[in-house]
Amino acid sequence: AVTTDNVEELARFAERRRIGFPMISDEPGALVRAYDLLDPAMRPSRRHNGLPIPTIFFITPDGIIAARLGHQDYRERPEPEQVIATIDRIGD
């Protein structure tokens, strides 16, 4: 996971939620902007350098983005069935 939260916030969140996967701090928001994931409805503030739109990228072993799931509304998330169907589709 990549987020604009700082390293300390990520560590607290990971511990509190028992996150078992790597989480990377993109506090300046460089990756968020590079992949055009900055939520236009959220203004940058001192705490965040803009909020990213939650997005899942499916990347092939050779580094190609094979699929992308996300929605402009941060409250909308792909259903697990949609994620699995995407994996099945790109795995063929």
Image (cartoon, rainbow, N blue to C red):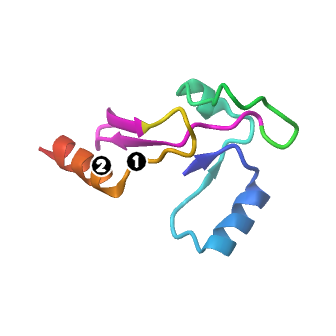
* Label annotation for residue 42: none
The residue sitting at 54% across, 60% down in the picture is: 22
Is residue 58 found inside the magenta-colored segment of the image?
yes
Q: Position of residue 20 (x, y in %)?
A: 52, 70
Pointers 2 and 1 in contact (C-beta within 8 Å): yes
Image check: 36 left or right of 91?
A: right
Q: Give the quadrant of residue 7.
A: bottom right
Front-lying residue, 50 or 74:
74
* Label annotation for residue 78: 1
Picture layout, residue 72 above or below residue 83: above
The residue sitting at 25% across, 45% down in the picture is: 86
Q: Which residue type does callout 2 highlight?
A: Gln
Q: Position of residue 57 (x, y in %)?
A: 40, 40
Q: Position of residue 28 (x, y in %)?
A: 74, 35
The residue sitting at 17% across, 43% down in the picture is: 89
The residue stretch that appears in magenta: 49-69
Picture layout, residue 46 above or below residue 43: below
Is residue 79 found inside the magenta-colored segment of the image?
no
Image check: 67 left or right of 13?
A: left
Q: Give the quadrant of residue 74.
A: top right
Locate the C terminus and report the quarter of the image it occupies: top left
Picture layout, residue 41 above or below residue 20: above
Q: Which residue is mark 2?
A: 82
Front-lying residue, 27 or 17:
17
Q: Which residue type does callout 1 highlight?
A: Pro
Q: Position of residue 9 (x, y in %)?
A: 76, 58
